[in-house]
């Protein structure tokens, strides 16, 4: 079978194609005939050697994928050959509170991932795909959608009528917009592109602000909420945008700090509104398999479809990475396999 490997992690050009024997499942494992996988921002850092310690050159990249179970090893229960599946990328975080040990079995990072024709996945992490969902749609979800769900549902305890703010139009943010609307909330979103903001309006965004032409975007958001501010923030920008996100918050808001898209802050974030407005700020690292199952149930019930910007062929996976670097997309970038 054909597989991609990280290689020496000096950048996207280090990714390399290899030929391997067909994998056999060990105890507790399933072999999946992969149909689709998707990229996340961290995959750029992993390919460039800037996401934690160096990985083995033979590591198979990508945390997100979907396909058919073609073999199961001893002691596997709950899935069978022929099932359509995706998987929770933290393969041992099935439920309950976070423990750092989940990083020891993270698909595409500490264990082999999905950018391969046949993937070996811990069977306990597998999640069945709803009948009306395609492989590409399912492959778009594990990291980005589950993280957005974890902030909005887990931390945010969203209620109808809440206002959810998210920054930029990448994978996590577009899912945040859609999950907000699914819950009868209002969605606010920022972008550097008016064209992308127009797409967000089509997806149901209620408040859109261009953060390039409105560097005071927090004021623009506050103005458009009649001065009230937002109730939940999916903070993809990181510490460089946190001061403005907090300034855009309503009393008792919940802010999930998940990303670092805006780079290093020039000054420490201004945290004063946290006390004055009784705001909860929490770091969120992805979510559990249980959250993933809940997300799929909600998507199935509401017919919510992931926004897939572009699909690349398996042999062309390097160009999928380059497309992410160029940031010309909205939502998710998918690689079709097999
Ligand atoms: N904690 C976790 O478990 C977790 C999980 C997933 C992702 N993350 C992190 O969350 C962030 C988002 O991930 P992603 O996969 O959604 O990324 P992504 O798809 O690569 O997002 C790219 C988009 O981010 C936007 N952006 C860039 N700089 C920005 C800025 N200064 N302010 C606002 N938006 C900006 C741009 O949107 P426009 O083109 O519209 O301007 C760009 O197109 C990343 O830092 C990622 O590493 C964390």
Image (tube, grey):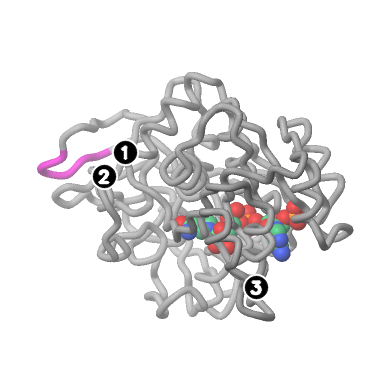
Q: Earlier in the sequence, mark 3 or mark 1?
A: 3
Does the magenta portion include 73?
A: yes
Say which quarter of the image contains residue 32: top left
Distance CA(mark 2)–CA(mark 3): 31 Å
Looking at the image, which residue is at 17% across and 47% down? 28
Whether residue 314 appears in magenta in the rendering, the answer is no
Q: Quadrant of residue 244?
A: bottom right
Q: CA distance from mark 3 to mark 1?
A: 31 Å
Tell which circle, 2 or 1, labels the residue nearer the N-terminal end: 2
**Residue, x 36% and y 43% (percent of image)?**
87
Which of the two residues, 115 or 223, is positioned nearer the viewer here?
223
Q: Secondary structure at mark 3?
A: loop
SS for callout 1: helix
Local crowd at mark 1 within 10 Å, few (<14), some, or many (≥20)?
some
Q: Position of residue 215 (x, y in %)?
A: 83, 62
Residue 204: give its label: none
How packed is label 3: few (under 14 Cα within 10 Å), some, or many (20 or more)?
A: few
Q: Which residue was labeled with disc 1?
A: 290
Pointer 3 residue Cβ closer than 8 Å to ligand 1: yes
Distance CA(mark 2)–CA(mark 1): 6 Å
Q: Is residue 196 above or below residue 315?
A: above
The answer as to whether callout 1 falls within 8 Å of ligand 1 is: no
Residue 320 appears in the figure: no
Q: Is 249 positioned to the left or the right of 63 in the image?
A: right
Image position, residue 148 (x, y; %): 51, 45
């Amino acid at each position: 079978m054909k597989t991609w490997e990280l290689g020496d992690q000096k950048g996207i050009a280090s990714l390399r194609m290899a030929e391997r024997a067909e994998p056999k499942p060990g105890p507790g494992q399933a072999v999946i005939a992969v149909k689709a996988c998707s990229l996340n921002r961290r995959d750029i850092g992993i390919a460039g050697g800037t996401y934690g310690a160096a990985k083995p050159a033979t590591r198979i990249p990508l945390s997100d994928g979907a396909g058919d179970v073609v073999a199961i090893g001893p002691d596997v229960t709950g899935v069978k050959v022929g099932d359509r599946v995706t998987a929770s990328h933290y393969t041992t975080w099935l439920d309950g509170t976070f423990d750092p040990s989940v990083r020891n079995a993270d698909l595409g990072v500490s264990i082999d991932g999905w950018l391969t024709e046949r993937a070996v996945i811990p069977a306990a992490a597998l999640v069945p795909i709803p009948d009306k969902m395609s492989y590409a749609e399912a492959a778009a979800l594990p990291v980005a959608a589950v993280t957005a769900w974890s902030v909005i549902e887990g931390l945010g305890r969203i209620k109808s009528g809440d206002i959810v703010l998210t920054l930029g139009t990448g994978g996590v943010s577009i899912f945040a917009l859609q999950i907000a609307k699914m819950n009868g909330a209002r969605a606010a979103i920022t972008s550097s592109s008016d064209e992308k903001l127009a797409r967000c309006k089509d997806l149901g965004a209620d408040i859109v602000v261009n953060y390039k032409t409105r560097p005071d975007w927090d004021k623009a958001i506050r103005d458009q909420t009649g001065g009230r501010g937002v109730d939940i923030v999916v903070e993809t920008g990181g510490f460089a945008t946190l001061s403005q996100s907090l300034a855009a918050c309503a009393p008792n808001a919940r802010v999930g700090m998940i990303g670092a898209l805006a780079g290093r802050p020039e000054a420490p974030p201004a945290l004063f509104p946290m006390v004055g407005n009784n705001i909860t700020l929490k770091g969120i690292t992805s979510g559990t398999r249980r959250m993933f199952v809940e997300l799929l149930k909600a998507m199935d019930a509401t017919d919510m479809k992931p926004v897939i910007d572009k699909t690349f062929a398996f042999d062309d996976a390097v160009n999928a990475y380059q497309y992410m670097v160029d940031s010309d997309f909205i939502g998710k970038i998918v690689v079709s396999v097999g």
